[in-house]
Amino acid sequence: MIFETHAHYDDSRFDGDRDVILNSLSENGIGAVINCAASASGNYATIELVQRYPHVYGALGIHPSDIDDINEGFYDWIKSHAKHEKILAIGEIGLDYYWDKDIEVQKKQRYWFGRQIDLAKEAGLPVIVHSREAAADTMQVLKEHHAKELSGVIHCYSYSKEMALEFIKMGYYIGVGGVITFKNARKLIETVEAVPLERILLETDCPYMAPEPYRGKRNSSLYLPYVVEKIAMIKGVSIQEAEQVTEANARALFTKVK
């Protein structure tokens, strides 16, 4: 079965057919799903989703673009709910310098990124890292907070193959989604060629980043076979092997999955 390691089914774009999609995944070859929180409301919704659907697990955390949602009180809320049996990781956390160039905002992002890494270490959970146009600072914060003591995934990877190998040396996985199918995905294709299949995780980031031939439309876990097919082609393995290895990778990282 395909293991979906990064989705946002709390998004309002699924309000009309959330049940239909989530209940149809198994019959379409999709097994476990991790719903990744981003905002405060997304954290609350993630807890509701994991309680409602047996195959849906969760990650709790505040996305860098929603950094105003976190304070000491909400940090404590995440800390307490991270003990839930179906919460597998702290995420989606990290840095995003694409949307906000303000130095003070970026400083705040780095502070709370580090704090949430510390929370993950204390909770004994891996991290799901968002990093956009912030490669050097992402690496620096991870090193400053001794993130080698835990593992995680660099979600929606967009940097060079050389940096991917550095993250792998630190014990991290590389998240690959629909972008790998795009015609302009040369850099990501080079990364997938360079890194071991045993360090790749499948993800959608749905409702965003739908693969070809659905680019520009709402994404869902049902489109993951297109990602598997492309990775298999790049790595020169069968689709079945690509699916099995990436599922084993996800289960090795997210150890609380039954």
Image: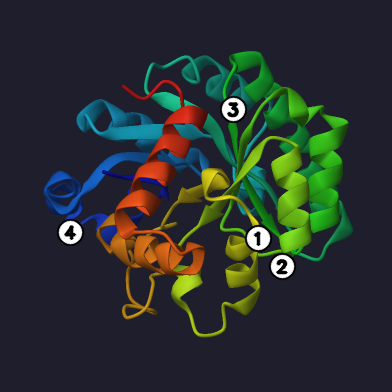
Q: Residues within 10 Å of mark 4 (few under 14, many from 20)?
A: few
Q: Name the residue under label 2.
A: 98
Side (left or right) of 253 relative to 229: right
- Of residues 245 and 213, which is closer to you in this image? 245
Q: Can residue 210 be seen in this view?
A: yes
Q: What residue type is labelled 3?
A: Phe
Q: Mark 3 points at which residue?
A: 74
Marks 2 and 4, Cα distance to the nearest angstrom?
A: 31 Å
Q: Which of marks 3 and 2 is nearer the N terminus?
A: 3
Callout 3 secondary element: helix
Q: Which amino acid does label 2 sit on?
A: Tyr
Are the residues flagged by discs 2 and 4 in contact, CB closer than 8 Å?
no
Could you tell me which residue is drawn at 34 percent across and 59 percent down? 238
Q: Which of marks 2 and 1 is in front?
A: 1
Could you tell me which residue is drawn at 43 percent across and 45 percent down? 246
Quadrant of the drawing holding the C terminus: top left
Side (left or right) of 53 relative to 179: left
Q: Name the residue under label 4.
A: 16
Are the residues flagged by discs 1 and 4 in contact, CB closer than 8 Å?
no
Could you tell me which residue is drawn at 74 percent across and 22 percent down? 149
Is residue 86 shown above or below 65? above
Q: Mark 1 points at which residue?
A: 194
